[in-house]
Image: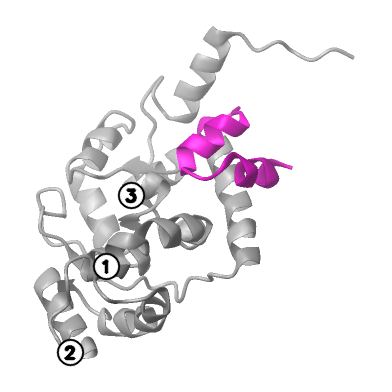
């Protein structure tokens, strides 16, 4: 039995179809985000432009509402960049990325502030409790100063805000988010951080990636999530 050879053109058409880029589809904003897995959201307008190109009769107000209702969320995820994802996907995506975030954001820049990795682990649940409603950067830095008994040093809030699985809190149209973010805890509860959970969640992320972009190689998966090829290979096994 011989397999079907995938041509470069066929692969291109398949990926475009999975990404809803061959024709617009009659989906609402939240389902559109789910279908394409994740949308770059470094710039506030980017998810809106992406969905306008993919959905028939796209109304920006629909995505505004999806963000407000927490059906779509914005957070630091793959490649340590901001993405808009469906709320159902966020826990697994964040758990999959935990080892990467921990290594990147609790390194020398963070510890130069005088805080340790253990300090960060202790602060995370307290920060999530504090962020039970939208909190500005100024409020979070003031809170951190209260926890430490002194104003936080450079690098402390930078590392902690990205290590903690916070969401960006929507503010107001247009684009739901400005360039001065506020933060809020996710409604889905605590993120698991043990190695077994991270490995299982990476397998979930890989399956979602393949549904939205596949077929793909180990290198493709590693680049998409910014994980080691060893982790990507294990997730594909």
> Residue at 31% across / 76% down in the picture?
115
Disc nearer the start of the sequence (1/3): 3
| Image mark for residue 84 | 3
Q: Nearer the viewer, mark 3 or mark 2?
A: 2
How much space separates mark 3 and mark 2, taking CA atoms? 32 Å
Which of discs 1 and 3 lies nearer the camera? The answer is: 1
Measure the C-alpha gap from mark 1 to mark 3. 31 Å
Q: In the rendering, at what x and y percent does residue 28 appear?
A: 35, 45
The image shows a total of numbered marks equal to: 3
Colour scheme in use:
one colour
Q: Residue 233: say if magenta.
A: yes
- Considering the numbered disc 3 on the image, is that residue within a helix, a strand or a loop? strand
Magenta range: 212-237
1 or 2: mark nearer the eye: 1
**Horizontal placement of 172 versus 75: left or right?**
left
Residue appearing at x 61%, y 8% in the figure: 7
Q: CA distance from mark 1 to mark 2?
A: 19 Å
The kind of secondary structure the magenta stretch mainly shows is helix
- Residue 69 can be seen in this image: no
**Is 224 inside the magenta-drawn segment?**
yes
Q: Which mark is residue 146?
A: 2
Is 47 left or right of 190, judged from the image as shown?
left
Q: Position of residue 223 (x, y in %)?
A: 48, 35
Q: Nearer the viewer, residue 31 or 73?
A: 73
Q: Is residue 119 above or below residue 188?
A: below
């Amino acid at each position: 039995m011989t397999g079907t050879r995938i041509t470069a053109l066929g692969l291109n058409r398949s990926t475009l179809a999975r990404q809803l880029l061959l024709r617009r589809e009659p989906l609402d904003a939240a389902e559109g985000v789910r279908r394409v897995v994740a949308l770059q959201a470094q710039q506030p307008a980017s998810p809106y432009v992406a969905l306008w190109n993919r959905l028939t009769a796209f109304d920006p107000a629909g995505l505004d509402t999806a963000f407000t209702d927490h059906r779509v969320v914005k957070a630091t995820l793959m490649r340590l960049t901001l993405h808009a994802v469906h709320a159902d996907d966020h826990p697994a995506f964040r758990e999959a990325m935990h080892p990467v975030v921990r290594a990147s954001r609790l390194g020398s820049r963070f510890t130069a502030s005088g805080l340790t990795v253990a300090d960060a682990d202790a602060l995370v649940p307290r920060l999530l409790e504090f962020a039970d409603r939208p909190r500005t950067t100024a409020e979070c830095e003031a809170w951190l100063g209260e926890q430490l008994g002194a104003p936080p040093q450079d690098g402390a809030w930078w590392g902690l805000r990205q290590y903690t699985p916070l969401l960006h809190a929507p503010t107001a149209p247009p684009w739901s988010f400005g360039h001065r973010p506020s933060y809020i805890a996710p409604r889905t509860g605590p993120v698991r951080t043990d190695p077994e959970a991270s490995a299982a969640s990476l397998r979930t992320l890989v399956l979602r990636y393949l549904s939205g972009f596949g077929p793909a190689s180990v290198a493709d998966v590693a680049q998409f999530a910014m994980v080691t090829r060893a982790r990507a290979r294990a997730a594909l096994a």
